[in-house]
Every structure is written in C-alpha cells, then in structure tokens.
Image: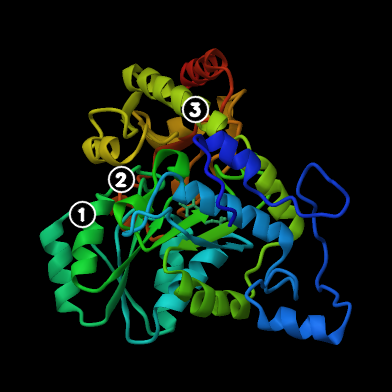
Amino acid sequence: MKNKKFKGISTLTLHTANKENNNSSHTTPIYATSTFTFDTAEEGMERFAGTDKTKLYTRWGNPTFAAAEQTIEALEAHGLTNEKGEPLQLKALLHSSGQAAMSTLFLSNLSAGDTLISHFSLYGGTQELMQKILTEAGIKTILIDVRDSALLKQTIEANKNVKLIHLESPANPTLQCVDIENICKIAHAHGVKVSVDNTVATPYLQQPFALGADFVFHSATKFLNGHGSALNGVLLGKDLEFMKTKVWKWHVLLGGNSNAFDSYLLIQGMKTLEVRMERHCSNTAKVAQFLDKHEAIEKVNYTGLTSHPDHAIASKQMKEHAPLISFELKGGIEAGKKFLDALEVCTRAVSLGTVDTLVSHPASMTHYGIPREERIKYGITDGLIRMSVGIENYEDLEADLAQALSKI
Ligand SMILES: *Cc1c(COP(=O)(O)O)cnc(C)c1O
C-alpha cells in the first residue's frame, strides 16, 4: 500500500489505486490474464521467491485486484494508528463475492472442534454458511444476543474452543447494532478474535479496526461498488503476517479470487463512495421520518429514529445512520405485495447499496432459506419490507412512496 496521507475520503478513493501501466492509461487497466510472463528463468525464480504475489498467476493475485485492495485498505485504515502511534497498516484480500470472502474468513480461523459465536438477524447467506457448511466441517456456531455482556462472557467460558466472534452491525435487515468496542474487549480478554461485517455501514460511517476488530469483512457488491454492476467480497486483517501466510494460502486454495473486470468496476465505483454516502444518508433520514408518520405503517426500523432499540449505540459508533431501513405495513403481507407492485420509481430487487432505491421482501427473498419460526424470532416478520435508499432526488422518492401507500 502506498503511504500517501490524504485528509479526506474522496481524495483517498480517487488517488490511492495504483495505475501501474506502460501506456499512460488514466484509469486502472483491466489485466484480463490468467498468467504472467517472465523474461528469463531467473526473473521467474525471483518473482516466486518475492513477497509481491500479483504477477504470477491470477488466482494468487493480479495488478487490478491489488489496486482495489489498496483503496479498501486505505479506506478502513484512514486516520487510524497502531499501538505505536504509527499509521495503521492493513492487508485486504479481494474475493469473487462476499460469500467467498466469508468462507476464507471462517475456514482460515476455525477448524473441526472449534466454536464460533455470533448473533441473530445476520445476512441470510452468512447464517446458512454457519449452519450448513461449518456444521458439516465440525465447527459449532452459537447464536446469542451478544449485546448481553454477561451472557457473552458466560458463553465464551462455557465453550472451551471459542476462536472467533462474528458481528454484523448494523445487521441486515433489522438494523440491529451491537457495541463493537465492548465485545472486542470481552473477546480479547479471553483470547478470542473478532470479525465485523461492515457492509451496511461502509468505512465512510464506521471503522471497526478503530473499535478493536481483528478482521473486517465487506460484501463489496453493495455500497463499495455502489452501482450493482459486479460482485466482490473483501476480507481485511491487521495481523499482516497471518493475513499474508495462512489467510492468503486458504484464499488461494479455496479459489475464491475475483476477476479483473469486476475489480475494475469496484475501483470505479469506490471513487464516488463519499459523495454517494452523503446523499444516501440524507435521503434515508427523510424517508424514515416520512414513513414513521404515515398511518399505513406499523413500525419503521431505522437506527436514526430514537424508537430503534439500538439508536444509542449506533449514534456512538457510526458517523451517521446507515442508509438502510425496513418497515412493517399495518396490512401485513397482502398490503406488502400491493405496495411493492405499485412502486414506479423504486426498483423491486434484492441486494442493497446501489445508486437507485431497492425495495425487497426478506421473508420470501433474502431470508427464504431460514425457517419461519426462527426468522420471526429475529424480527424478520412476514410483512417486513426492506428498503435500501438510493441517491434519487428526495421529492421523487417521497412522491413514489406516497402514491404506492395510497394503493394498499
Ligand atoms: C450481500 C451481503 C453478504 C454476501 O455478499 P455477496 O457479495 O452477495 O456474496 C454478506 N453480508 C451482508 C451484510 C450482505 O449484505
């Protein structure tokens, strides 16, 4: 990573990526190549023996991936220092999707006989990965309310091989937030590491390494890309030695590498992260106020509302409130269907973090794989609607919501 110091996030996302190329291309070139050439046998030997793994074979690394990784490292480390007061150095590994990055995270940190602690209301794919693949690999997952410090301590102590606590804050789609700093303190006192899914907040709103996290995860498919044009996942760690040895090895052997075109789209998308987030956040605050006052709405989940149970912790650990909300219509599932069908500006689609507003129904879409009783327990009720608020002009969003609500 280049050691350039930038005061602001936009300058950083515009100027960090290495534009390494012989043809003076303004944007980072798309290195669409599986392998890299050596002029001599000697050069090949030297490259294999060296620490730069970006010019050997693309499953091991690629200059386009490296440029995306450098920008994400700079974003998550922006303004932070290590214990010695030096600028924090991170290692990011770009993957083909969030799920691929999550697989590397779990499998490089946990093995048969180990225990993972996490909480309710996780992204559906994360919970299924834990319950299906990790369980078959002999890794036990315990889901508890990690906001309860006494319960967390007791669970760590009652299970000998607890190696990792995985957090998602804010969580998708209930917007539950957990106190990352407090949980890291408890975990570290017991020799347990902590990983944080920072997809919904993005480094613009929250930097988990500042709160003590050991690993940060992103589905870069969402706000980091911002345009819904590609899938990517990223795993970052601050233990550089561990990241460059075991975690890198597991990443390479599991084969979850990205590709040059999707990495290029991610690099382009990240350039506008800050300006997009400013608009996403201000629109969301207004949408939440509008929905909260509407007579057809039973309940709005948005951490910026004082009625949200985690409003205080969200306000403490995030710069602003994340641009994701969910809400319950008084008319339940039937009203939900009519509402979705009546939308004319908002896009009906799963996923989140795109420039346009996306509206989905978690119970029948993203959380379909989770048994009904279980998801209801986590707050994902039948009539819950999730909205990832885009950067449209606010007046158009409000008009669309008002007309759709009038039709239910
Ligand atoms: C989308 C998402 C994932 C999974 O990422 P993919 O890129 O779809 O594989 C994980 N966590 C959260 C919070 C997500 O929104």
Residue picked out by circle 2: 176
Q: How many marks?
A: 3
Element carrying mark 2? loop
Looking at the rendering, which quadrant does residue 34 occupy? bottom right
**Quick check: 359 left or right of 167?**
right
The picture places residue 203, in percent across and down from the top left corner, at 46, 44
Asked whether the beta carbons under mark 1 and mark 3 sit within 8 Å of each other, the answer is no
Q: Quadrant of residue 142?
A: bottom left
| Residue at 62% across, 75% down | 51
Reading the chain from its start, which is encountered first: label 1 or label 2? 2
**What residue lies at 41% left-to-right and 34% top-to-bottom?**
325
| N-terminal-most mark, 1 or 3 | 1
Secondary structure of the residue carrying numbered label 1:
helix
- The earlier-in-sequence mark between 2 and 3 is 2
Q: Nearest the camera: 217 or 392? A: 217
Q: Give the amino acid type for the residue marked by disc 1 in the picture.
A: Asn
- Residue 278's disc number: 3
The reply to whether residue 133 is in sight is no
In the picture of the structure, the residue carrying the numbered disc 1 is 182
What is the x, y in percent for residue 62?
72, 65
User: Looking at the picture, which amino acid does disc 2 mark?
Assistant: Gln
Q: Residue at x 72, y 61 (%)?
A: 63
